Image (spheres, coloured by chain):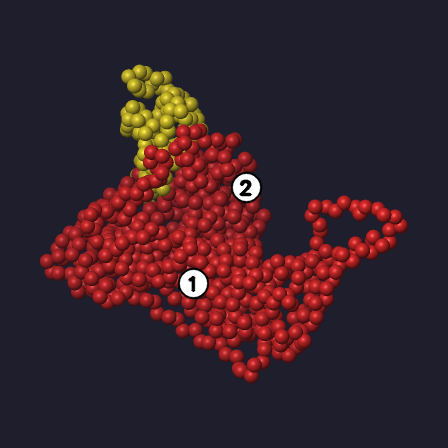
Amino acid sequence: MARELSRTRLNRRKFMAGVALAGAAGTPLAVQTANAAAPAIEPPPPRPSALPPNAALAAAETAPPQEITQVEGGRPGSDFMVDVIKTLDIKYLPSNPASSFRALHESLIDYGGNKQPEFLTCMHEESAVGMAHGYFKIAGKPLLTLCHGTVGLQHAAMGIYNAWCDRVPVIVVGGNDMDAAHRPPGVPTFHSAQDINALVRDFTKWDDTPVSAQHFAQSFVRMYKIATTPPYGPVMMSLDAGLQQEPIRDLGQKLYIPRFVPSSPPQGDSGAVKEAARLLVNAEHPVIVVDRAARTPDGIKLLVELADTLQAAVVDQGGRMNFPKTHYLNRPPNVIGQADVIIGMELSDFWGVVNGFVDNGSNGIGFNETKIKAGTKLISISSVELITKSNYQDFQRFQVVDVSMPADAEATLPALIEAVKSAIPNDRKAAIAQRGETFRKAYANGRENVKKAAAIAWDASPISTARLVMETWAQIKDLDWSLVASEGNVSNWPNRLWPMEKHHHWLGRSGGYGVGYGAPASVGAALANRDLGRFSVSIQSDGDLMYAPGVLWTAARHKIPLLAVMHNNRGYHQEVMHVQRLANFRNRVAYLGNDLAPLGTGIQNPDIEYHKLAESMGWWAKGPIKDPADLAPAIKEAVAVVKSGQPALLNVWTQPR
Amino acid sequence: MRNAFILIAAGLVLGGGAAFAASAENGKKAFVAHGCWQCHGFEGQGSVATSNGTVIAHTQLPFEAFETFVRSTNRAMPPYREAILSKADLTDIYAYLQSVPKPPAVASLPLLNP
């Protein structure tokens, strides 16, 4: 409809019609002319198997744009879109540029003044989504990213899946030139599709394809609202290039921008809350298991209050910073085996909490085993039940529970705490207090055991992951630090040894375990921390960095300070072990080639010089560091650089885990 | 320095009622070549992520028990049968694990006692 109204008014359409005609006729005409002029019948020269693009095709993708957006008849749709976006106070827009949203891009930086949001140049759509993912975990506010609706969204898809699994809102808008009769032929048409949202529909909370400016306004505010209502999640909009570029249709109605009013998170049913409290206060060994329970710093306080009231062990699975590591009720997962009541909050895998899967057996086929005693009562508070979809299996195995609350844990905690306080019988109070004393002793012993484990291979080269983590800690402990990512698995040493207490001390992991999250999420979180005056540090693994290292340039370009200490074990280590495992099951010697690891899993020969890679993109960097004695001075130097506002990277060769 | 230590540590390992000459130096190479390092670290320090925290450096298991476990494990660790890991190599690996440097006392490490 938009095209019918605008066709006669827009030079764009006339110009593109000309391009299309030339593109369609150019090559055949040239061939006919050459044949007519030939004095004798000569066979045409052999044609290469791959022809260069014709002039029209090449111009459409590579030449300076010859058309400009005309404002005849009204303001461009994309200017109004910027007005809409600005009402939502979105601070940044990490994005890789693309022709399908050129109109909105131009409006953002020129009409919108490149503020709220500020465009951040990215070199990969996956990086842009990863940055938005990390940013939210610090700022608590979503970012917007724009991408080409087809190839760009394909790049972005893994990052969107990670955000989905990690329950993080990201506002994704994909440019898509939908009018087949008028869009440019050639490359722009390759980059168009009927329904780009279908690519990510299985792992976004909502999507839409607006067909008018007013429709955009409604859908953009709606998608923001849906994304930021717990359970959080990414949302998607297919945005027609014509709708962005053309003047707004005058339908005799004044455009309006809906006001954003946040939704309150869903709370657990009051009856279910009371039943949960009754079970918990009467339990001999209640255990609280949390994964993404603390959405905000308040969530930590509430969990501490519940745990203190019950003197119950807390197992923090680390999807977020849920519970202080310095609290004596913070216990390792093996306390599950003693439990008679377990309450799981925002768990991504309740089955995996109470069951084990051993990837072994007589034929190399895994088997299951329970981790809990018969009769253990299970309680679940999980908002994820409200958005379960079918295709992707992030919902994990089905676990029967005794009390199920499809609700947001943090929002339900105040009612649960009150119910627990009311339900504790007087004759239980002494036993509950005694339970706490037992945990104090266990916590103290556990700390000593962790230190002893950390001391093993302390002077090893490659450097032990415990040494790496503690040398880093020594240089940042007096700062307001934030561990923005720890990828590649350093045996969980930061969580075991660092006194994590604040919500920004630990952000959790990728969610979907899609490798390539760590580097962009670190940069995104560091961006948010920069604005809050905090110091950002990441444990950056080698394989993760190489998925899209261009995000290093983005960090330097936009002056985002971040200390990246590399856990460079020179391999895709999970896969190193998987292939070895299969070789053993099959009674075969794993072929290593010239590497240390089974062929196809190592990252060596040649070794990547990550410090040079980072330097080439504007980072201060040093490496490779192989001697643990060299770590402290290098980290100290890097910290000074980061405090001055620059990103810094240390390439450290490490033990595998 | 470490190589010298390994050579000195090479010794005798009793197994199956017989005495085997064991080389810690060869054991270190076999430890790497057979992929033991992948889950246990280059010095047998282990990891909560890959060996459930089990430390095999200076293992207290007698060689016979060690061998039985390695050959027949059906838990998280895959088995290494004799077809893919010879008894000689396993004996050397055992010697290597006895030879790695012992960890410093925790009290001597300021970083672990902030």
The number of discs equals 2
Q: Residue at x 40, y 29 (%)?
A: A587
Q: Which chain is red?
A: A
Can residue B38 be seen?
no
* In the displayed structure image, the side of residue A313 where residue A227 appears, left or right: right
- Distance from disc 1 to disc 2, alpha carbons, whole Å, reads 40 Å
Numbered mark located on residue A446 in the image:
none
Numbered mark located on residue A205 in the image:
1
Callout 2 secondary element: loop
Looking at the image, the residue that sits furthest to the front is: A41
The chain letter under disc 2 is A
Residue B10 at x, y = what percent?
37, 21
Q: Nearer the viewer, residue A277 or A546?
A: A277
The amino acid type found where label 1 is placed reads: Lys
Q: Label 2 belongs to which residue?
A: A609
Marks 1,2: beta carbons within 8 A: no
Q: Nearer the viewer, residue A455 or A365?
A: A365
The amino acid type found where label 2 is placed reads: Glu
